[in-house]
Every structure is written in structure tokens, then in C-alpha cells.
């Protein structure tokens, strides 16, 4: 019985299937003879959200002289919308400094809503012995053309992962992603409670003080606590952002901690956070960058200290030979030679610089190695932005579309 039933069912299905083919042939014959649209709306939207780069004009420059910083207001050169982003993300700025081609990631400090008017703002702070920041601060003028990447990074609020309350720990120009979040909360783009603990040296040194205090007075979901390390003043906390201070201002119940600031602040804050009983998934940090003192890290090969190595770079058909210091990343050596190599985060996280280490050895700090896939480790693919040469090497680097 059951066999007969199946045969009958199959027979009916076959009949319907054959009918479908006939119907389809009839529909094709009836269709007008015109070219099919070569692009799909979904691809066009993906390009708007994730452009390879954005051509911008510097529309304005805001000087924060007390904080040794400037905010650059970029506007899309063709007047269109800028790529939409999540508050907390960054863009990579492409620079030609002398014969070097370099990129630098900067958190966006404006609200995502401003991207709809074609505007993206970044704030650059002067860095002692810096390379790109002093160049930008001295040379960028209103009307200049600047190329920036699309928005990148995962340092934004994600309700599926983060607690409803966020305690932000910021130091210096590390306030920028939190200013973007605070603006986004105020204008309704984001919905979470944000308590910002902001460390500065003195009152005069506080970046975006007026803007932050204004947002906090207008929006009950944003609180700002200023912490001064070099000055005691009524109405301000004094010292460093430690476990005690976090406990004092953290809300009841669960909260996420987001950290953005210089390396020294990050390392201090990380130890303090370990004293608190917080699930690891609730502790988030912005790009760490790479340490300036790689030889002090565990496992660094002593024999490499102070040496200069030969780096052979293969890009497609081209081969280059450059000198690389043991204490600088392979990417830095390549860029200094003016060779176009792709990069965005410069922290070993995004994968844009992923390259094949054909021969030789490199030291990769464990703290910068979480973005590398298991198979990449197995087959010797590295991120030159977070790898230091420890011998002469040969490396195959993908070409960059931005140069
Ligand atoms: S630039 Fe992001 S991993 Fe190297």
C-alpha cells in the first residue's frame, strides 16, 4: 500500500514539475527583449556602506589648543552622503609624507547622523616623537583633499552582547569614540546608558569638555565624570581611574566597560578591572595599536634586539628590498620605503594587511594576535602591522587599492 502511495505522489510531483518548465518557457518567450540590469540594488547598497575609500575635502578645522589637538571636519568631495557608521567605529586616513605612504586609524568623533550630510569628523592629538599626527596638525588646510577608508571596527554598542549600562574609561583623545556615542544617544540613534569616566591632566587639558557637559545636561542617559591626574579641583575627581572609582560611579547590576586611551592608561585600567567581578565579554577595548617597547614583551628573542634585517617584499610581479629594524613592525618598514601596502587598524585585528611570510621569522605580540585565523597561523600568514622581523625575511604582500 505504502509503495503504491509513494509512486502516485511522485507521479503527481513529476507532472507539476514538467508543467513548471513549460510555464517558464512560455514566460521567457513573452518577456521583452531588453538588457537585464547589470547591477543589483543590494550590491549598490553594500558599496555605499562599505566603500574601499571615500574622497573627502577638509571643510573646517577646530583647534583645541589647551588639549594640543585639532578636529578635522571632512565633507564628501562630491556632496554625497558619507558611509553610515556605528558610533565608536574608526576610519583609516591615507597619508603621503615625504616618500612614505602611511595610514592611521582615527575614531570618528561625530554622530552617525552627520554622515547623512556627508560629514565625518576626527580629532588628532599631538604625539611626542610622532610621525603622522604632527604632519596632519601642521599641514592639513581647509580645502585639502583627503582619502579615508569606510568605517571599520567593532568598538560599538551591541545590545546582544553588551549590558544595558556602559561605563566608558577614556584617556586624552580616547574620548572621541565616546563623544560619538554620547551624541548618538542624545539624538536617538543609539539607546543605552553611558557613564564616561574621563581622565585628563588638568581642567584646561580636557578635550571636548563643553560638548560633553552640554550633552550630559540635556540627556539623562549620559553622565560624565572628569578625573584629573595633575590637579585637585572642587567638582572633579582626582588621581587615576582605578577600581574604587569605577565602583563609585558604576550603576547597580550588570554593566559593560569600554576602554579607549593611551597604552599606559589601558594597561593600568586592565589591572584595576581585574579587581572587579566582571564577565570578560563585558570588557571591551578600542584598538590597542602595537607597543613601542616590543623587546620587553614575554618571549621576545633577545638576539634580535637592536638589529636591522633585510625585508624582501613581493607585490604581484614587483619585488622590493627594504631595511627593517627589529623594534619596528614590518608594515612600518614597507611604508617608509614608499611601497603601497594595505592596512587599516594597525593593531593586528582587521586582517586588511594579511600577508604570506615566505621565509624568515617574525615576533608577534600575543596581545595583537587574536585577529589571526587558526589556518593563517598554520600556513604562515601574518599581519605585518603587528609583526616584528627577527631575521631576514621574504614576504608576499597584497597590493593596495588606495594608492
Ligand atoms: S591593518 Fe588591520 S590587521 Fe593589519
Image: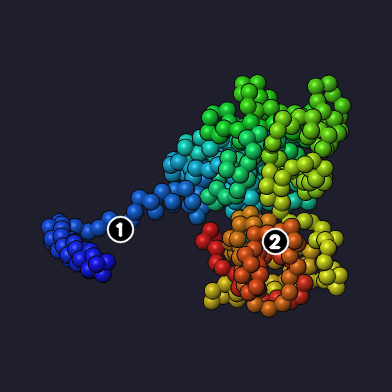
User: Percent x, y for residue 337?
Assistant: 66, 66
Tell me where residue 335 sits by quadrant: bottom right
Q: Quadrant of the N terminus?
A: bottom left
**What count of labels does the image hold?**
2
Q: Which residue is mark 2?
A: 369
For the point 82% across and 28% down, the residue is 237
Residue at left offset 83%, top offset 63%: 298
Residue 99: image quadrant is bottom right
In the foreground, 377 or 288: 377
Q: Is residue 236 above or below residue 67?
A: above
Depth check: 122 or 390 in front?
390
> Which element is circle 1 on?
loop
Number of the label disc, if any, that sits on residue 38? 1
Q: How is the image coloured?
A: rainbow
Element carrying mark 2: loop
Q: Name the N-terminal-most of marks 1 and 2.
A: 1
Residue 36 visible to an observer of this rendering:
yes
Percent x, y for residue 267?
80, 48
Q: Residue furthest bottom?
A: 359
Amino acid at each position: 500500500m505504502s509503495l503504491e502511495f509513494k509512486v502516485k505522489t511522485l507521479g503527481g510531483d513529476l507532472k507539476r514539475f514538467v508543467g513548471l518548465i513549460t510555464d517558464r518557457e512560455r514566460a521567457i518567450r513573452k518577456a521583452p527583449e531588453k538588457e537585464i540590469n547589470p547591477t543589483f540594488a543590494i550590491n549598490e547598497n553594500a558599496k555605499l556602506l562599505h566603500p574601499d575609500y571615500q574622497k573627502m575635502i577638509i571643510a573646517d578645522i577646530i583647534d583645541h589648543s589647551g588639549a594640543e589637538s585639532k578636529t578635522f571636519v571632512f565633507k564628501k568631495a562630491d556632496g554625497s552622503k558619507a558611509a553610515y557608521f556605528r558610533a565608536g567605529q574608526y576610519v583609516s586616513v591615507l597619508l603621503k609624507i615625504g616618500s612614505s605612504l602611511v595610514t592611521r586609524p582615527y575614531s570618528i568623533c561625530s554622530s552617525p547622523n552627520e554622515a547623512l550630510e556627508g560629514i565625518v569628523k576626527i580629532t588628532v592629538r599631538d604625539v611626542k616623537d610622532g610621525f603622522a599626527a604632527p604632519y596632519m596638525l601642521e599641514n592639513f588646510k581647509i580645502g585639502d583633499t583627503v582619502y579615508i577608508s569606510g568605517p571599520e571596527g567593532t568598538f560599538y554598542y551591541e545590545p546582544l552582547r553588551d549590558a544595558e549600562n556602559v561605563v566608558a574609561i577614556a584617556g586624552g583623545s580616547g574620548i572621541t569614540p565616546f563623544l560619538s556615542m554620547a551624541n548618538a544617544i542624545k539624538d536617538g540613534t543609539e539607546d543605552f546608558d553611558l557613564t564616561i569616566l574621563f581622565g585628563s591632566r588638568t581642567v584646561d587639558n580636557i578635550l571636548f569638555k563643553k560638548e560633553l557637559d552640554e550633552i550630559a545636561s540635556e540627556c539623562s542617559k549620559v553622565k560624565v565624570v572628569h578625573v584629573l591626574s595633575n590637579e585637585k579641583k572642587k567638582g572633579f575627581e582626582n588621581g587615576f581611574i582605578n577600581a574604587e572609582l569605577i565602583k563609585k560611579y558604576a550603576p547597580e547590576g550588570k554593566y559593560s566597560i569600554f576602554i579607549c586611551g593611551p597604552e599606559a592608561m589601558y594597561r593600568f585600567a586592565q589591572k584595576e578591572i581585574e579587581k572587579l567581578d566582571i564577565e570578560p565579554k563585558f570588557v571591551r577595548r578600542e584598538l590597542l595599536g602595537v607597543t613601542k617597547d616590543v623587546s620587553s614583551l614575554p618571549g621576545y628573542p633577545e638576539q634580535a634586539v637592536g638589529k636591522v634585517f633585510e625585508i624582501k617584499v613581493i607585490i604581484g610581479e614587483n619585488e622590493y628590498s627594504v631595511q627593517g629594524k627589529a623594534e619596528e613592525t614590518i608594515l612600518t618598514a614597507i611604508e617608509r620605503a614608499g611601497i603601497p601596502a594595505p592596512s587599516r587598524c594597525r593593531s593586528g585585528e582587521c586582517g586588511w594587511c594579511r600577508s604570506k611570510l615566505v621565509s624568515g621569522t617574525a615576533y608577534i605580540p600575543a596581545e595583537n594576535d587574536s585577529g589571526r585565523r587558526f589556518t593563517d597561523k598554520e600556513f604562515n600568514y601574518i599581519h605585518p602591522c603587528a609583526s616584528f622581523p627577527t631575521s631576514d625575511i621574504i614576504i608576499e604582500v597584497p597590493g593596495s587599492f588606495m594608492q
